[in-house]
Structure formats: structure tokens, C-alpha cells
Amino acid sequence: YADHSELARRVFQPLVAVIRRLRDGFNVLGAGQTILVTTASQEQVDQIMGATTLRELFDDIVCGLEKSAANPACYREALRRLGAESTDCVAVEDTLAGYEAARTLGIPCLLLPNDYTRGQRLHTT
């Protein structure tokens, strides 16, 4: 995206709304954590977090690791940090690669496409 405001409008705002609702649910239940799992580098994450208020939404961030069905390293690391089983978690993804990575490890996943990924199709075999 050419500028941060378009990125925020098209990608961040819809996901932030979902994450805020999940965190509200965790507060009601008295349990639960949110972890950002992204292939973005630490430098990219730091830049976005520094320019926004997104950091407050996450208890932890896993970044810079592969996110694909063939190599779901990012979700494996998130499970390790949580000390959780895949069935204890739910992933919220806006990309097919992330969806496939989560599902490879047996993590239930909600796919919420953004304007960029909406036209993509999941290819199952």
C-alpha cells in the first residue's frame, strides 16, 4: 500500500475490530491471550507498532518466521510460547497462507479476508 492510512483502512481496521471483541470475551471469561503471528520482520513490526496503537491488543508477538502449510513455524512458535495445544487455540487469519499454516497444526482458524486477499481461493487436495 502506498500510504499507511490506506493500509489501516483496508487491512487493520477490520482485524482490530475482531481482536477487540475477542479480548472483550477473554475479559468476561477471565482467561485467554492474543498473540500476533506474522511473517513480517521485527523491524517492520516495530515500525507499525510505533506508528499505531496496535501493540496494546497483543500479549505477545511472533514475527519473522515462515507461515505456510509446508512450514508453519510461526504458529509452532506461538504454541510453544503459550504452552498450549493446538485445540486450545483459535487463529484469525486474513491470508490463505496463514490459514493453511494454522490448519496444518490443527489450530481451528477463522479466515477473514481483506480487500487484497478476498479474491484468492483455497486449493484443497
Image (spheres, rainbow, N blue to C red):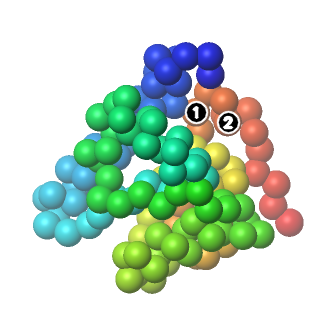
| In front of the other: 55 or 50 | 50
Query: Where residue 107 sits in the image (x, y, percent)?
Result: 53, 71
Q: Which mark is residue 117?
A: 2
Please identify the quadrant where the C terminus is shown: bottom right
User: Residue at horizontal 69%, vertical 54%?
Assistant: 97
Q: Name the one closer to the observer, 65 or 13.
A: 65
The secondary element bearing badge 2 is classed as: loop
Q: Badge 2: how crowded within 10 Å, few (<14), some, or many (20+)? A: few
Task: Kindly identify the residue that appears in the image at 53 percent across and 41 percent down.
Answer: 44
Tell me where residue 104 sits by quadrant. bottom right
The quarter of the picture where residue 120 lies is top right
Count numbered badges in the picture: 2
Q: Amino acid at mark 2?
A: Thr
Residue 103 occupies quadrant: bottom right
The residue identified by callout 1 is 114
Would you say the residues marked 1 and 2 are in contact, meaning their CB atoms lie under 8 Å apart?
Answer: yes
Direction from residue 103 to residue 125 in the image, left or right: right
- In the picture, measured across the screen, residue 17 lies left or right of residue 109, that is left
User: Does residue 15 appear anywhere in the picture?
Assistant: no
| Residue 10, percent from left and from top | 52, 24
Q: Which mark is residue 104?
A: none
Element type at marker 1? loop
On screen, residue 82 versus residue 94, left or right, reads: left
Q: Is residue 93 left or right of residue 57?
A: right
Quarter of the image where the N terminus is located? top right
* Residue 95 visible in the shown view: yes
Residue 113 placement (x, y as % from top left): 59, 39
